[in-house]
Each structure stands twice: as C-alpha cells, then as structure tokens.
Image (tube, rainbow, N blue to C red):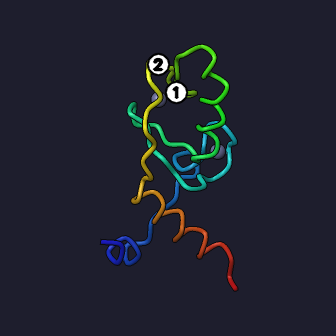
Amino acid sequence: MAEQQRERGVELDNSQFCCAVCLELLKEPVTIHCGHSYCRSCIEGCWDQEKKKGKYSCPQCRETFNSRPALRRNNMLAEVMACSLRRRSPS
Ligand SMILES: [Zn+2]
Ligand SMILES: [Zn+2]
C-alpha cells in the first residue's frame, strides 16, 4: 500500500496536511469524529482548555462533542507525513 503511494509520488498539498491549531505539518496526526486532523498535542491542548466547559469542539468546524473523544492515530496520514519529511531532509 505504502509502496504504491511512493511510486506515484504523493503530491503534498500542505494545507491538507497542516494542523489548524499550530499551522505546521501534522505531528503525530490524529483524526477526530468530524474528519478533521490535528497533531495529537494540539488537540489535547485545546480540549484541556475546554474541559472546564464540559464540551469539546473541533477547532475547524466547531462540531461539539459532549464527551472527550478518544484519539486514534491516523496511520495513513502518519505514513504520508513520514514520507514527506524524508523527502525534505536530503541527509
Ligand atoms: Zn498542531
Ligand atoms: Zn471538524
């Protein structure tokens, strides 16, 4: 699967792989229920602040969750990020 991606060359549209919180490329990408992806530490940080309100929302689409959603690593994104990082650093 990953091999196919590499052969075709994944064209990285940065906006698609940037975290809306820190505006950097996703680090340890996790995808939440609405389909948006963030760095694990960024969304954890957001939700730590929202904890007082007892509601958790997506910083991008504002969809709210009444209970803190479990964060699952997005393996597909993580793989894409790893590939793009390898290509960026020529060492
Ligand atoms: Zn981030
Ligand atoms: Zn969202």
Q: CA distance from mark 2 to mark 1?
A: 6 Å
Circle 2/circle 1 CB separation < 8 Å? yes
Residue labelled with disc 2: 64
Q: Position of residue 38 (x, y in %)?
A: 55, 43
Residue 59's image quarter? Answer: top right
The one nearer the camera, 43 or 18, is 43
Q: State yes or no: Cβ of the residue under disc 2 lies below 8 Å from any atom of ligand 2.
A: no
- Name of the residue lying farthest toward the bottom: 91
Relative side of 78 to 22, left or right: left
Q: Which class describes the residues within 10 Å of circle 1: few (<14), some (14-19), or many (20+)?
A: many
Observer-nearest of 31 and 48: 48
The residue indicated by pointer 1 is 58
Instruction: Tell me residue 16's x, y (percent).
Output: 51, 46
Quarter occupied by residue 49: top right
| Earlier sequence position, callout 2 versus callout 1 | 1
Query: 30 above or below 11?
Result: above
User: Which residue is painted at 52% across and 59% down in the image?
Assistant: 12
Considering only vertical position in the picture, is 65 above or below 8?
A: above
The amino acid on which the numbered mark 2 sits, given as a three-letter code, is Thr
Identify whether 36 is placed above or below 66.
Answer: below
Q: Say left or right for 74 vs 56.
A: left
Q: Tell me if mark 2 has few (under 14), some (14-19) or many (20+) residues whose alpha carbon lies within 10 angstroms of its own.
A: some
Residue at 46 percent across and 43 percent down: it is 71
The quarter of the picture where the N terminus appears is: bottom left
The residue lying at 48 percent from left, 47 percent from top is 30
Residue 45 placement: quadrant? top right
Q: Amino acid at mark 1?
A: Cys
Image side of residue 44 versus residue 30, left or right? right
Q: Nearer the viewer, residue 61 or 6?
A: 61
* Mark 1 C-beta to ligand 2 under 8 Å: yes
